[in-house]
Amino acid sequence: MQKKLFALGAVALLSLTGCANSAGSPAGNGAPAGNGAPAAEESSSDNSFDFTERSAQASVSAPSITFTVNDDLQAVAGDYADDRVFDSVTVTGLKVKDPKYCAVEFVYDYADGVDVDTLVDGYLELYPSLEGDRTQAVSGVLGFDGFRGDRAIGEPDLDNLSPLMLWVADDSKSATWVTDCATQPYDSESADVPVSFWSAGDSADGTFSQDAFAHADLTVMKNGDVTVSRYEAYDFVQDSNGEWIAD
């Protein structure tokens, strides 16, 4: 059974432990990458990431990274391909003047047929405790469940930063996140930049449902570089031949 997205958000933003190994290298599906920790200087120049084990063979670090879900994984994942919310999520590090903080921009490419207002309405139905707060619902739809900071709809004010600030664009196609800077790319305690892929649909009783499918945690350095610190495709792993199997 897939984990619900709200639980995933709490892990991403509050616990920040687990998947990274003791050397601070990236790990996929809860296991150390390859046979040893890749050195930072071996970082891949490729700025794409699709949750396959190949991504664990070298560090993935760049000013901007575009996340997708591997086609072969989608092919074995039941209804996910039909019910997915995002085709891709691009994370770009921003250079901000304030020495206390770093920031990233998310750009969301929605799957064909996805209507954000419908997702928000469903999210509010799923979480009545939000009492119709659409700002919280939009941020939840984008994968920021469990977020403890301030949220706003509109353009970011990068000249007046505060810790844990989230701005979501009016059209919900982008967002800006303010967080602490990492002291090194694989600083697991600073890996609090979340990227979440999930699917939306109706549960057996006809109510709205959402299921987390894959997640990555990133760090951001002061120069704007973003790095995949840990990641997981829920309920699936690759065998030694590269075939996806149920976990």
Image (tube, rainbow, N blue to C red):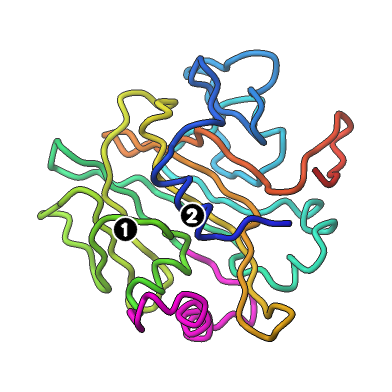
Residue 3: percent from the left, percent from the top? Answer: 63, 55
Q: Is residue 152 above or below residue 195?
A: below
Segment tinted magenta in the rendering: 108-133
Q: Is residue 71 magenta?
A: no
| Mark 1: secondary structure | strand
Q: Establish if 133 lies above or below 10.
A: below
C-alpha separation, residue under disc 2 versus residue under disc 1 = 12 Å
Dot 2 corresponds to which residue? 90
Residue 178: give x, y in percent of width and height.
26, 50
Residue at the location (62% across, 74% down)? 209
**Residue hosting label 1:** 176
Of labels 2 and 1, the one closer to you: 1
Q: Earlier in the sequence, mark 2 or mark 1?
A: 2
**Marks 2,1: beta carbons within 8 A:** no
Q: Which element type, helix, strand or loop, lies under badge 2?
A: strand
Instruction: Tell me if residue 40 comes above or below residue 2 in the rendering.
Output: above
Q: Is residue 220 left or right of residue 127?
A: left
Q: How many other residues sit within 10 Å of disc 2, few (<14), some (14-19) or many (≥20)?
A: some
In this rendering, position of residue 114 left or right of residue 243: left
